[in-house]
Each structure stands twice: as C-alpha cells, then as structure tokens.
Image (spheres, rainbow, N blue to C red):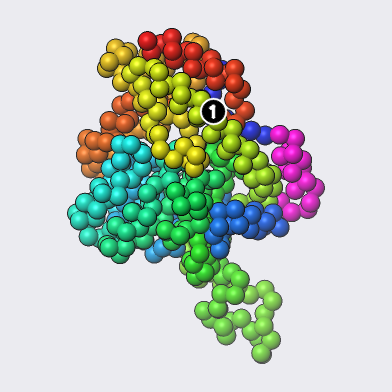
Amino acid sequence: MIPYGKHYIDEDDIQAVTDVLRSGSLTQGPMVEKFEKAIAKYVGAKYAVAVSSGTAGLHIAALAAGIGPGDSLITSPMSFVASANTALYVGAKPVFSDIDNATINLSPNILKNTLLNHSNARAVIPVHFAGLACDMAEIKKVADKSNILIIEDAAHALGAKYPNGQRVGCCSHSLMTVFSFHPVKAIAAGEGGMVTTNDESIYHELLRLRSHGINKLSDQYQIPEQAEENGVSCPWYYEMQELGFNYRITDIQCGLALSQLNKLEKFLIRRRDLVRKYDEAFLELPNCRPAQSSGRDISGHHIYVLRIDFKKLKMSRAELMSMLKESNVGTQVHYIPLPAHPYYRNLGFVPEDYPNALDYYNEALTIPLFYEMTDNQQQLVINTFKELLK
Ligand SMILES: *Cc1c(COP(=O)(O)O)cnc(C)c1O
C-alpha cells in the first residue's frame, strides 16, 4: 500500500535518539534549547518555545496573546480541528471566515467582511494550507485596520516561504507562528510543536505557560519578601504566577527533531519534484486538477490535493477511494469543513455558510506524497488515475 503520507526515519535519527538516552537527561536538558535555537535561526525569528504538540502551541499562543472570554477568534473553516478548538480552549468564540478558491487559504477579502460582522474579534489564525503560505501582507493590512492580532497556524508549513523569500515562522506579519512535529508533518518529533515570536514579553509568557505558570528566566518575583530570609535569597524559591500547563517537550523528542531538521531541505526538494511531476501528469487528465497551483517553488508541500469533479466522473469519492485502494493507492480527505463536525454544528455553525470550503471539500482528494516515495510508486499512482478518470 502506498500511503498518502509517511514520515522518514534513518540511522542518524536512531543514533540521535540513542545519544539522548545515553546522555543522562530525558527532559528539560540541553536538547530542548538546542532545538529551539535551531528552529528560530532556520525561520528567522528571535525566539522559539518548544512544546508537547502543535495544539499545545496554539493554546498557549492564544493565552499569551491575551485572548479570552468575550473575544472572538477567526480562523479558516478548512483546517484540522485544532485551529478552531484554540478559541474554545481559552473561552473565546470561534468564527470561521471562508477560504479563497484558488489557494484554499483564508481569503483576505472575505476576512474584511467577516470583521465587519464581528466587532469583538481579537485575533485571526490563518492556516497555511498544505504548506502554501497565506497572503500575509494582505491579511496583515486587513487585521491592522481592525486592530486584531495574528497567530499563524504553520503546522503544514515548516520550510515554506512567503513570496518575498522570508521563511514562514519569521513573524514579520504576525505576533506568533505555531508549528507541529507530528510524524505526518514536515519533520517528526513523535509529538511536538513550536511557537516562534519576535516579542520578548510574549516569549517570557510562553515559557511560563508551558510550565505551570511558574516564573522563568529573569521574571520579577511578585512577592519578593517570600524570596529571602534575613536578606539572604532562598535558593529553592519560585512562584506560580498564573495558571499554566505541563506542555513541555522531552529531550528525546528534540534529539529526534534536530536530526530530522538536518534533512528538511532534502525532504522539501524531493516533495517539490514529486509535486511538479504530478502537476504535469494531471494537466492531461479530465475531470481533475490540483487544488493549488500557485507558489509551487515556495510551498512546504505538506500534502498533494486533487480536485475531482465527481459528478462529471459519475463516480462517488468513496467509490474512487476504494478502487484506488485495490490498486494499493492510499488516499485521504483534508479536511471535513470544521463547521460540519457535530460539535461545531451544536454550537450553531453550518458548513453551507462557507460555500468555498464546502465546494472544495466536495471535490478534494489527497493522494500519496512523501519523501521516500519512489518514481515507480508515483508512476503507479499516476497510471491508476489515468485508468480510473478516463
Ligand atoms: C497537525 C495540525 C495541528 C496540530 O498539531 P499537533 O502537533 O498534532 O497537535 C494544528 N493545525 C493544523 C492545520 C494541523 O494540520
């Protein structure tokens, strides 16, 4: 079976994890900071805070931004559930703003209208779908006019660039950017996430929230008189200053992630080549087209999505998927529109309010794309589609 996506682990990764296991520290040792510094340098941000997952990163990013009850948080209806759940975690109201048909990303124009109808919006979480960066310059213009913050959900986009050549994560258009290192993403840590920012006070807040709300680095004590006895400072003293979490990542995970980061460029180049070959092949096939076609040289290419006109094809998606499976071609759908989930329907949302996301959903099929995919495997996928789509 050729899966739709797959992580890649080599002997260097195994050695890197083994090295950590032999090093004496399993968590909160040197690897976490090393990984943070490496990501900050790679994306071009001042600060990076590693956490236990991308979801944990989104959660503390929203808290650090000061979003809470009474606020609305806008995101894309076409994403993984974590993007919108972030609003609910902090007691804010999730608001969806429809996607652009050509990019599957948040549309800056539609966002403008969404903001007109939501005066209590405090922040927007654009999602770089499949690794294609959102039009951040436009989104920032729109957000600035309404005085709202931007937190980028870059779970798909490690290694991707904006059209101006800067890397996603540099935060030149946002307060924070969040990455995920789940195995299906660009690099694997097992589970893991990272928040990048250029704001020093946000950085300190993220460090506290990651670890129970306990003061970190040079944070001032709130009750300094408790911190000393007869003028001698107490070496054991620390303060819990707010309600935080245990969202720490381990040294074991960071050892793996650092080793994976060494291969990221190689991963991206192979993915880009595979995408180019797919693009060419599907140009000639009826009733289908790539869901995205812009930014091919700068996207992170997290997944490859085809849009298929199932009505014209006179075949349902489920039927096509099972026929593909018989030819050992694994596929998936990214994603069910968030407003279609029962939990969101119960909150009053309906997918029909987001026609672009719904149209896309009705046609979307994610086909195999991963670093280790061989030319032969890709040819098999293409040939199978040629057979089934004609
Ligand atoms: C994977 C993903 C997340 C969550 O990341 P985890 O590390 O799995 O918690 C958030 N947003 C999007 C768009 C994702 O694809």
- In depth, the one of 281 and 231 nearer the eye is 281
Place residue 15 in its image quadrant. top right
Residue type at mark 1: give it: Leu
Q: Is residue 250 left or right of residue 44?
A: right
- In depth, the one of 352 and 252 nearer the eye is 352
Q: Is residue 276 left or right of residue 258?
A: left
User: Does any atom of ligand 1 lie closer than 8 Å to the CB of label 1?
Assistant: no
Coordinates of residue 119 in the picture (x, y in percent)? 22, 60
Q: Residue at x 33, y 54 (%)?
A: 138
Q: Is residue 349 left or right of residue 10?
A: left
Place residue 269 in its image quadrant. top right
Place residue 123 in its image quadrant. bottom left
Is residue 55 at least partly visible in the picture? no
* Above or below: residue 121 compared with residue 315: below
Q: Mark 1 Cα within 10 Å, few/some/many (few <14, many 20+)?
A: many
Locate the N terminus by quadrant: top right
Q: Residue 384 colored magenta?
A: no
Q: Which residue is mark 1?
A: 274
Coordinates of residue 191 in the picture (x, y in percent)? 58, 43
Q: Is residue 229 left or right of residue 2?
A: right
Coordinates of residue 204 in the picture (x, y in percent)? 53, 67
First to last magenta residue range: 10-26
Main secondary-structure element of the magenta-colored stretch: helix
Q: Residue at x 79, y 51 (%)?
A: 23
Q: Secondary structure at mark 1?
A: helix
Work out which residue is located at the far right of the displayed protein and give it. Answer: 22
Coordinates of residue 315 in the picture (x, y in percent)? 32, 13
* Above or below: residue 145 compared with residue 125: below
Is residue 160 at least partly visible in the picture? yes
